[in-house]
Amino acid sequence: MKKGVLALCFVIFSSSYHTQVTSLPKIESGVSYELAQLRKNTISEIKYELSLKIPESKSERISGTEVLRFNYKKQNEAPLQIDFKEEASSLISVSVNGQMTKPVLENEHVIIDAKYLKSGMNQIHFTFLAGNGALNRRDGYLYALFVPDRARTMFPCFDQPNLKANYSLTLTIPEKWSAIANGKLKETTVLQGQKTLEFNQSDLLPTYLFSFAAGDFKTSTEKIGQQDSRLLYRETDSVKINNSMDSIFSLYRNSLAYFEKWTDIPHPFQKHGMVAVPDFQFGGMEHPGAILFQNSTLFLDQNATQNQLNNRSNLIAHEVAHLWFGDMVTMNWFNDVWMKEVFANFMADKSTGASSNKSVYDLKFLTTHFPAAYGVDRTLGANPIRQVLDNLQNAGMMYGPIIYNKAPIMMRQLELLIGEDNFKKGVSEYLKKYAYNNASWPDLIAILDNHTPEDLQSWNKVWVNDPGRPVIDYDVKYRDNTIEHFSLSQHPEYGKDQKLWPQEFQLSLFYTDRVEKVNVKLSKKQQEVSALKGKAKPLFILQNSSGIGYGVFKTDHALIKNFSVVKDPINRASAYISLYENMLNGSGVTPQDLLNFFAGQLSTESTELNLRLITGYIATIYWEFLPENTRLKESGNIENMLWKALQIQTAKNNKKILFDGYQGVFQSQQAYDNLYTIWKSQTPPKDVSLNDEDFTSLALSLALRNTNNNDLLQEQLTRIKNPDRINRFKIIMQAASSDQKVRDDFFNGLTQKQNRTNESAVGAALGYLHHPLRQQTSIQYLPKSLELLQEIQKTGDIFFPDNWLRSTFSNYQNPKALETVNQFLSQHPDYNVILKNKILQATDNLKRAQVLLK
């Protein structure tokens, strides 16, 4: 029985837990699972009092004092390990329960001798110099970003998610600066050009959600409920500010109201607050009372595309959802980090979908999640949704499209399986049971299990605990132009295991005058669909026409030639995705034929999200899956079709998408002259709106096709007025330079950690450095890029290793690039498994190109 299996899992887990906590953990780097479980068993009631003095110059160290209070169950004479990943010289003094002790820092831990500790409440005082790694110090501002285990790089702490604490923070900053933190601002004093801000004690939080930001920010304040809420920002474009500010607060309020109603739990924290961060390395981060957002996603002008508007509404809803899912109820261990992300994404989709009709919601869900999830799950480096984690120092490697995109698809299938009402009841019960505490995925499954007769354990194994996706095919037999027999089959894309993916999706039969739809619940390896028996032979059959099924759905050969009868945008999007996935697998259609089909759709595909989808596919096929000589022959035709479609399409957003597509693939001199005139005169084509960032992007596209581009890049630099965007462009223009030495110096400089601090800009720069038009000279950087990966993982934020790899390898098709990858992996047989998987994920198209280009 399913509940018996679950109980057995808990017995096994409890036995291993008992074994781990009764042994003494060794002193090793990071935060091992063993150490975390021991501390969870012995430490509680944690409070931090932190005072930080932040100088204006980012080159000066930040000094700090800390009082750490906690209840301790002293079991033996083992020393206490407190996490602090800094140089020994940064730990200036330590006193324990009033006794000064010699600071001892070993393997990233402050070691406190047991003789100074007692059962009950303990108090430790630290004087220290804060580490800069997670404080993201830029010119004129900083922001703390401690996820997943980087709080320990700034101050001594118990850096694990299931030791929640209260934080009392005092910041001394330059007088002209502003600041925000998790707690409400209690008191401000000014003395001799310095401003000291004392914040109220925070709500109960894990270390990764403790945060603050300080700097030369502007402030906008509006009411959220009965409370004043502040947004700190550095945007200087008055048009974007005026066009965006009301929308930002409105989207926040709407999301808040939706989640309060859906969960039946009021906003769970003491305050609201937001910071818009230039060049933020994430989309956002959900610190309660101090949510960080990517500036460029929040601030849009009046010509923003639907995709940009969707991204903004999704981002805000995602971070607000986290206040319940992740912030109020937090995972026990970072192997379940995906739980907070899947709920945030899934609930954000629900929230934003509540204000639109179902077809708009379904199309956005399909085009947002499926291509991104497939981009990892189709590879030999695919990882399951729920992964094993031995040490928190490796937690950052667990993030990626499987967590953010496959998991919401899984959750939608789970909701379909047990029913929307049962799902909502179960989740609400889970939130209320574990409020302000920690829980695991088995805890949630146990609750949901009580709300359904379905076998969630078997379902959970293939969807959550295993990687990969099914290949779903069909067999149809006709007699006298009617369907006599129709059956579906499924098998794993890789391997011989007989796994089954129970799921729902739709089949559609297309005729010249109608579409007939049948909903399918696939649960077997082979399954007859009796509802189709006796139906007239269609022009073609489209699997997964509603776009909710997950896998490689084999396509009908007659689909492309009869595509004009596909009127529903969701049907078209599902067909586009299936055609592309089958092309990558070498079945159904060749890259050349699919490129021609997508190009032919440019003038007629009127739905913005679909047009963006196919222009993205066109760029990928063009640069990655056409031989160079074919690409050169096709370039003029593709340019002309994009430019023609730009004239034919009437919607301004569609015109902008097509202009971006044209800019991304052009190679002819005629196209260069056309775009150069647009850039030089700053006069876009009719009904195409270009802002400052668009002209910057255009300048960089031109620079890649210009053998002496210094003057062009310098002129573009003088046009940029915002200081943060100037700093970003100065990084990127080195990678885009036509001077080989400048590019060499840029890449060689990346071996130094300080040159990688602006990870967003570095990732963008790598895309230009390794652009297909530059790969003959950039291929030499690939071995060193792989050698640096482990250091990138240790010193960078959670998305940077993946960003580093994809920005480097994404557009290569050269066999020598694949040889470099294979040689590196063969020379490092014991390489970190998660990082190896990320290499396999980022180089999957490179591997496929060797087959598809033949």
Image: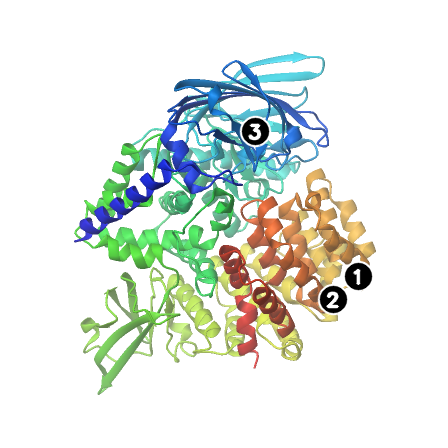
Q: Are discs 2 and 1 less than 8 Å apart at CB?
A: yes
The amino acid type found where label 3 is placed reads Phe
Query: In the drawing, what numbered circle is on residue 777?
Result: 2
Mark 2 or mark 1, which has the lower sequence index? 1
> Where 60 falls versus 598 (above or below)?
above
Task: Give neighbour class at mark 1: few <14, some 14-19, many 20+ (Cα, 10 Å).
Answer: some
Circle 1 residue: 740
Residue 739 appears in the picture as rendered: no
> Where 16 falls versus 117 (above or below)?
below
Q: Residue at x 72, y 48 (%)?
A: 731
Quadrant where the C terminus is found in the figure: bottom right
Rendered image quadrant of residue 738: bottom right
Q: Are discs 3 and 1 less than 8 Å apart at CB?
A: no
Query: In the drawing, what numbered circle is on residue 155?
Result: 3
Nearer the observer, 292 or 59? 59
Please identify, in this view, whether the residue under mark 3 or under mark 2 is nearer the observer. 3
